[in-house]
Image (cartoon, rainbow, N blue to C red):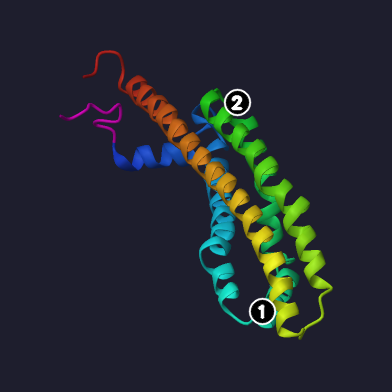
């Protein structure tokens, strides 16, 4: 079964340009903002997920003294100008995009991005500062090398709690990413409808 598209007969180039760079009647800056929101939220989901499925498993499998020293180095290096704009900028971008979407009449997109912003703050940022950073600060003062038994105990106490809260923020970040994608789908449908109406108006009432 084939479904009729509101874009049937409209040149692909016209549709692409209209959806991305159309005038205010087609959403203005909401399109690039929404795409940027998807990139930022996807980057943060990927960052958290990488710790879940590779980094921490690798550290758990190595010598505890090596794991502690490596984690201390990574915790120190993550405070950089590449990571910071994504981690701190994601909720700002989501809130801005939601506000712009609401202003141009893309209500469902605004709702999805607004909820995504709330989930990111409560489910990703809050656990990071409350638990992960606190654990990192405690680990930072551990001086290696330790005796094997002491190193094993120190790493076990750190890794289990840290991974639990990282899984929590990964789940929330994944939900944020999905909501932004859902918002983009809604936005695309709305803008496609507007493009079709605009094209129909350009053809005139008597055209087929």
Residue 74 picture quarter: bottom right
Which one is in front in this view, the residue at disc 1 or the one at disc 2?
A: 1
Residue 6 in the magenta stretch? The answer is: yes
Q: Residue at x 32, y 22 (%)?
A: 200
Instruction: Say which element carries label 2.
Output: helix
Q: Residues within 10 Å of mark 2 (few under 14, many from 20)?
A: some
Residue 143 picture quarter: bottom right
Q: Pointer 1: what residue?
A: 64
Marked residue nearer the N-terminal end (1 or 2): 1
Q: Pointer 2: what residue?
A: 102
**Residue 11 placement (x, y as % from top left):** 29, 38
Query: With 114 as the anchor, is 193 left or right in this view?
Result: left
Q: Does residue 32 appear in this view?
A: no
Query: With 161 as the anchor, is 104 left or right in this view?
Result: left
Q: Nearer the viewer, residue 125 or 14?
A: 125
Q: Nearer the viewer, residue 173 or 164?
A: 164
In this figure, what is the number of numbered marks?
2
Q: Quadrant of the C terminus?
A: top left
Task: Give the extent of the magenta segment.
Answer: 1-10
């Amino acid at each position: 079964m084939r479904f009729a598209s509101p874009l049937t007969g409209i040149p692909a180039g016209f549709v692409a340009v209209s959806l991305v760079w159309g005038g205010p009647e087609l959403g203005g800056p909401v399109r690039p903002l929404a795409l940027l929101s998807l990139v930022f939220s996807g980057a943060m989901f990927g960052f958290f997920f990488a710790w879940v499925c590779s980094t921490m498993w690798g550290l758990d499998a190595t010598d505890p003294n090596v794991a502690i020293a490596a984690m201390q180095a990574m915790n120190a290096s993550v405070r950089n100008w590449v990571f910071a704009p994504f981690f701190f900028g994601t909720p700002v971008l989501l809130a801005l995009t939601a506000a712009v979407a609401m202003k141009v009449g893309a209500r469902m997109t605004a709702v999805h991005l607004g909820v995504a912003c709330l989930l990111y703050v409560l489910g990703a940022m809050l656990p990071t500062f409350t638990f992960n950073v606190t654990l990192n600060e405690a680990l930072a003062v551990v001086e290696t090398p330790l005796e094997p038994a002491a190193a094993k105990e120190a790493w076990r106490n750190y890794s289990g709690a840290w991974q639990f809260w990282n899984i929590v923020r990964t789940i929330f970040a994944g939900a944020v990413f999905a909501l932004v994608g859902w918002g983009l789908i809604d936005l695309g449908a709305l803008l496609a409808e507007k493009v079709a109406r605009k094209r129909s108006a350009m053809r005139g009432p008597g055209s087929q």
